[in-house]
Image: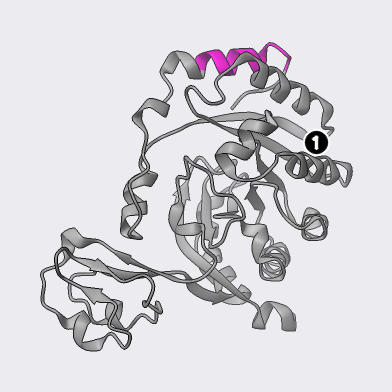
Amino acid sequence: MSKMSIETKLRVTEIQRFCMHDGPGVRTTVFLKGCPLRCAWCHNPEAQMAEPELLLNAARCIGCLVCVSVCPSGAQAFAPVRTVDRDTCRACGACSEACPTAALEICGREYTADELADVIERDRAFYGERGGVTLSGGEPLLQGEGTLALLRECRERGIPTAVETCGFADPSVIEAAVPHVDLFLWDVKDTDDVRHKRYTGVSCARIIENLRRADSLGAKTRLRCILVKGVNTDAAHYRALAELAVSLAGCEGVEFIPYHAYGGSKATLLGLPDNGNAAWIPEKEDVTAARAAVASHGIKVY
């Protein structure tokens, strides 16, 4: 094993096994912490910040006050409602270790690349010919050398790799990742730059530029687009998405992901407002129309 793969740490929010929707076959999906975008519809708000965070599920709290006795920063509060003072909380984990009902949890466990590869390899028997590991997030490429070390380690062990990326990353990291990634699941959240900035906080120009650069280096990609009713469910976007897919030598097709409001409930665990928006959930007809519009250009749709 390389020195880098042994020493580099990666911060993980969750590891999901037997996933069927994060690339081909059965996969182990590793969610890495930290993201440069702030999507209004974010499904994984706990993965936005790079630092560890304390999650509070107030419904599980029995008011035993054990957390108060062990918290070194006095961040636990019970009046007028059960909450955590996020300004003083250090996410040290003392409260979560002491909590008898798992009402408190630290989000952002650290692994070395070797440790994480060991966890991934436990599922090798289920991968078959098409499965493997998918790195997601957050934005996995934001962790740079750690992610590259893990990808290299998986490659050395013969574990197929996929990376779900928003594409807003350091070009040098993307270039270094290409030889070690079997498939990039590349998010194209919108092709309208004004809307992209409004709803994600950044321009889509860098995302498309990085996509084209990866393609020129031989990357295999699948474009992924979240469908948000009333935001990007329009013919111009579908046409631009299809034209983009056609222009890429290594693009295998386009996948549409209907927006859901479940991320809002996870935001409340961080002390944030529930931002779930039922009006954004597309109807079945919206999804069918999007798929048909792109398929009409000869693009495979997943």
264 sits to left or right of 214: left
Q: Measured from the top left, where is residue 243 in percent x and y?
A: 77, 22
Mark 1 crowdedness (10 Å alpha carbons): few <14, some 14-19, many ≥20: some
Q: Nearer the viewer, residue 215 or 2?
A: 215
Dividing the picture into quadrants, the one containing residue 285 is top left
The location of residue 273, given as percent across then percent down, is: 33, 50
> Residue furthest toward the right?
216
* Res 76 quadrant in image: bottom left
| Residue that mark 1 sits on | 250
Give the dominant element type of the magenta stretch: helix, strand or loop. Answer: helix
SS under mark 1: loop
Examine the rendered structure and indicate whether residue 205 appears above or below residue 45. Answer: above
Asked whether 159 falls inside the magenta stretch, the response is no
Quadrant the C terminus occupies: top right
Say what amino acid the circle numbered 1 marks: Gly
Residue 214 lies, in percent from the top left, at: 82, 46
Image coords of residue 296 (percent x, y): 68, 11
The quadrant where residue 115 appears: bottom right
Q: Which residues are magenta?
A: 288-298
Q: Is residue 263 above or below residue 193?
A: below
Screen quadrant of the N terminus: bottom right
Q: Residue at x 72, y 54 (%)?
A: 169
